[in-house]
Amino acid sequence: MKTKGFTLIEVALFLAISGLFFAAIMVNISSTVSHRRYTDSLNDLVENLRSAYSATSNVENVRQKDEESSKYCTISSAYKTVGGSTTIVENSDSDNYPGRTNCAVYGQLVTFGEQNSSRVHRYDIIGLASVDNIDISGLDDTIDALEKVQANIVTIRPQKTNQSLCKVGLAGNMNTYDLRWGARIEDTTVDKNLYKGAIMIVRSPVSGTIRSFKYTGTGTLEIQQWLNDINTALPDGSSCTSFASRKDDLLMTALKNNLMKTSQTTEFCIGSDDLQSNEQRRAVRISSSSGLYDSGAAYKGGMSETSVELLMEEDSRLKCPL
């Protein structure tokens, strides 16, 4: 009696066909997982950017009255020119208002591409709380108001043991965000270069309205590099007045040089190593619409609406070519 079985050829064919099916299933699962991760990265980034607006709208003053930096709200407000010479001027205790210090948080500066990375930095914008020196007659010019409250993101801090010696640091908080799953922020060209830029989200010191501005200078505001450079040039133990020459740096320089513009759209693409070669990058758009502008695109009045939007695939195809 013969016993029926499988020949070696039949077994080999079965294993080969099964292997092909298994490989196809694994490729499909891998593609699905990669796409899911990419989508999660997109949504997380958009929500993080939207939270910057929420943080500006529902601001909390994180600075404490007894904090050593609270006597100088910003590096810009720490110095005053009198009779042709620059001197350091402390804010008096009478400038402190009930429930807060003499400093106020006016918003956040969001930078992209600092230190040649896709890490997003968010810095508190600090200024003097008093608005007595702002002319509020007529329409509100947010940029002028920020200059008058000497808004900036850096300050000087005196040493507790020697008040004539200072160091420089951030005036408020800094938060960083790293995109998940290897995603990166790219420009809208086919070269897919790292996107560099910055946006300023602020409450007007006069009206309290939330407004957005785009940094129109070259690249981004390299704040971490600035801190590194100034701390190398003026390390701990430097005279407080030695920082006076840097009081107009960073945000104040951008404001005075008219490098912060509203009524502009910021767009960039999100790429990823997980994307297949034929998969389209998605575009993120940050836009604002407002009421009235002057010829220099400075905001002069009306309401401002800002949106952080993840564009649909069809629109992204035009903005983010492969």
Image (spheres, helix red, strand yellow):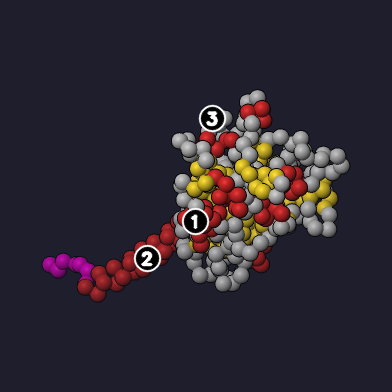
Q: Amino acid at mark 3?
A: Asp
SS of the residue under disc 3: loop
User: On the image, numbered disc 3 is attached to which residue?
Assistant: 66
User: Within 10 angstroms of label 2, few (less than 14), some, or many (20 or more) residues?
Assistant: few
Question: Where's the C terminus, which quadrant?
Answer: bottom right
Q: Is residue 199 magenta?
A: no
| Magenta residue span | 1-7
Seen from the viewer's position, the closer of residues 70 and 160 is 160
Judging from the image, what secondary structure is the residue with disc 2 in? helix
In the image as oriented, which residue stretches furthest toward the front? Answer: 83
| Front residue of 4 and 84 | 84
Which label number is shown at residue 233?
A: 1
Which residue is tagged 2? 23
Residue furthest out toward the left: 1
Mark 1 against mark 2, which lies toward the viewer?
A: 1
- Residue type at tag 2: Ala
| Residue 32 appears left or right of 64 | left
Checking the image for residue 249, the label placed there is none
